[in-house]
Amino acid sequence: MDIKIQIRTRRTQRHGVAHDLDYRWQGKRYRPLLGYNLSPKEAERRAFDLIKRIQRGESGATREAVMATFTFRDALPLFWNSFEARGRIDQVRPRGIIDHYLLPFFGDRPLTSITAEDGLNYVVARLKEKATAGTIRREFQVLHRILNLCVAYEKLDRNRLKAVELPDADKRTRVAEHDELTALKKKADPELWRIILLALTTGLRSSRILSIDRNWIRRHEDGLWLHLPPPKSRIKGHPASIPLNSIAVAALNVDVQALADGRVFRRWKHIRSFRKLWEATCRRAKVVDLHFHDLRHTFTTWLQRLDVSYEIRQALLGHKMPGLTAEYSHGGKEWQQKLRQAVTKLAASPFLANDLVDSLVYERPIKTVGLSKSLKNGEPRAARTLDPRLKRAMLYQLS
């Protein structure tokens, strides 16, 4: 059979000379990548093999030809559509990873040409750029997600980067010390300090604290609880509801003009602007190497030091129980009492000493509007249960 072959070559920055087949068959044009740095005979042999399979109508050959032209950049719309379908809203981090690191490295390369060695070269290059092991692992999470999606949607035969060894990331064990919290209190504005206290008394991440809506705060028989919507990520979970101790209640209400609904902390539209304020405040307070997420570690460490059981700490953090236990554990009144006891114990502990919470105390009670009707004697039931050092903090009415 007389087959006319046209093989084009092009020079790439990273991989040398690329050899592409340009072939038309039954109204379709195929332009698969044959390989890199091939000899003329090897390029011709690969082209003949692929053309014959296409002409025989082998589905694998047609699929292979399509895959051979499907680049990393071509895969991004699939990734973002999946991102939206899963209800993920924070696109900033993955978009930054893709635009700044993955695209410059993998760019317009066909996915079938990306090998495990390429993945290893990426790791080495990022280490030379002083990227931490944790950062590289997060970047590979995005990369694997893209490649696995392409496999699932038949744009790629397999993810060749699964075998790549990644650097071990040291688990962070940093907790905030009392003198550091005192220094932060002096330099933080009142709203930031309230957010810090919320992190220390609920263990919530900054993104979840900033999104708290006043409608999430509800009264139970034992006091106020914060009911959270389902997490957007299966990896970063949180509990469905958290009991609020007196310090958390004060931090959620002090100096806020309450509305019938809406976010408690309206100042920050995005988590990155909050992170900049946190880092600037730490610099002014001369607190070194303290991440806001470390306050979550501080919260659970304090509970551990107060002899709160592992199971209770795990539930308050929103981590899933090992094995199938979580599938058959559905809480109940007694379980909620244990959670309440844990956060109440924390509020009365020496870790949250008077000098850290006195900023929540005001001589003039703050009246909030639109949450519920006033209670007898102008003092709601919940206010009577506050720690004495916080009792003057405010007048709040919650149904």
Image (cartoon, helix red, strand yellow):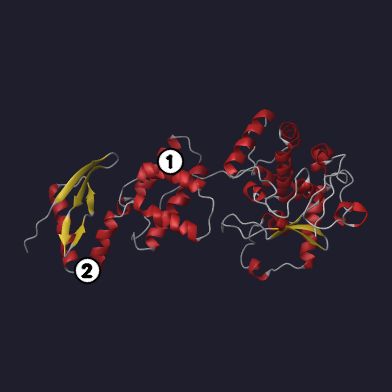
The answer to whether any part of residue 161 appears in the image is: no
**What x and y, as percent, mark residue 140?**
45, 49
Q: Compare residues 209 and 366 and report the one nearer the observer.
A: 366
Q: Which residue is mark 1?
A: 100
Figure quadrant of residue 267:
top right
Three-letter code, disc 2: Glu
**What x and y, as percent, mark residue 284?**
67, 28
Residue at x 84%, y 47% (from the top left corner): 348
The C terminus appears in which quarter of the rendering? bottom right
Q: Compare residues 56 and 169 and report the one nearer the observer.
A: 56
Figure quadrant of residue 390:
top right
Residue at x 20%, y 69% (from the top left corner): 57
Q: Which residue is mark 2?
A: 58
Which mark is first along the chain, 1 or 2? Answer: 2
Three-letter code, disc 1: His
Residue at x 29%, y 58% (from the top left corner): 67
The local secondary structure at tag 2 comes to: loop
How much space separates mark 2 and mark 1, taking CA atoms?
39 Å
Left or right of 168: which side holds 253? right
Residue at x 39%, y 43% (from the top left corner): 122
Please identify the residue farthest to the right as the structure is shown: 377
The N terminus appears in which quarter of the rendering? bottom left
**What x and y, as percent, mark residue 78?**
40, 57
Q: Compare residues 241 and 351 and report the one nearer the observer.
A: 241
Left or right of 87: which side holds 184? right
